[in-house]
Amino acid sequence: MPDDLLFDVPEPLTPVERLVTLAGEFTRHNDALALIRPTADSPPDLGAHAGSASHLAHESLTAVKTVHDQQLHASADLVDALVRIKQLAYLSNEAARHLTEAQEALAAASEHSGLPEGVSHQIQLAQELTALAAGAVIESAAAIARETHRRRPGAATAADGLTSAELAALHAAARGDVVMPQSLGREYVRSRDNQVRISTLRSLKKKGLVAREPGSAPPAFYSGLPQDRIRLTPGGTGAVSALLAAPMATPTISAPAAVPVPTTPVPTRSR
């Protein structure tokens, strides 16, 4: 073996990078499920989707083990984060079970009997079980990243040199919240908080931190065309992993301000 190949081995992912990668896999899995349109004329092949859900369950438990191997301080936030990831493993296995049962029903149906009853419902249940997984993984990764950083603080990070808008866009993409639809020849950006700009995504793409996957996300409405998903590149995964270690810098999606509710003064009892 040539000597130069001995050193051409990529460094293993850190536990936090594994989790950010896992969040992306959940998003890809959920997108694929959401694009299924089962009909009697073209019944879906659900075996691959069931295998994908089983893979996510395995990867979730593997991620938990890699965190345990770090022997971090078992803070309340860290324990909660690991429990949440274990719950995702359970939900993914349940999703795989629903998809397997739906596939078995399809295989048992005759060619002219139409779509078996309950198949669409099984697919919907599988979708709902993992629909929120990517966001939950990123939240858990943030707790783990902060505990890792507290124990082993580093100097420069992969997030250095990025603007606050770029960091917020990367965080949203990691959660699976950013798509780019097209309408009348124009491109748009849709995100959960509607704060990611197309100019920001173009800047991140130029820096090699995000990539656009055409037609991989479900349409905005049932009869619409699939949308383009914005996904992290390996460089983007490293940047988000570094970002999550800084509690004050981690972008959060702000909830709408609560509307004050008028209150009626409680009458005092006269003495």
Image: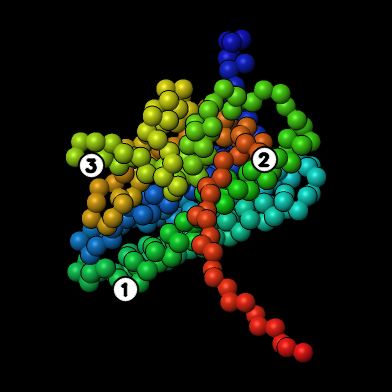
Disc 1 marks which amino acid?
Glu
- Which-is-in-front pick, marks 2 and 1? 2
Left or right of 269 in this view: 60: left
| Marks 2/1: CA–CA distance | 48 Å
* Mark 2, residue position: 247
Q: Earlier in the sequence, mark 2 or mark 3?
A: 3
The answer to which of marks 3 and 1 sits earlier in the sequence is 1
80 versus 266 height, above or below: above
| Depth check, front residue: 52 or 25 | 25
Q: Quadrant of the C terminus?
A: bottom right
Outermost residue on the front side: it is 271
Look at the picture and state if 12 lies above or below 192.
above
Please state which of residues 187 and 123 is positioned toward the viewer in this rendering: 187
Residue at the image point whose x is 43% and y is 59% from the top: 127
Q: Residue at x 69, y 55 (%)?
A: 80
The amino acid type found where label 3 is placed reads Ser
Residue 183 got which mark? 3
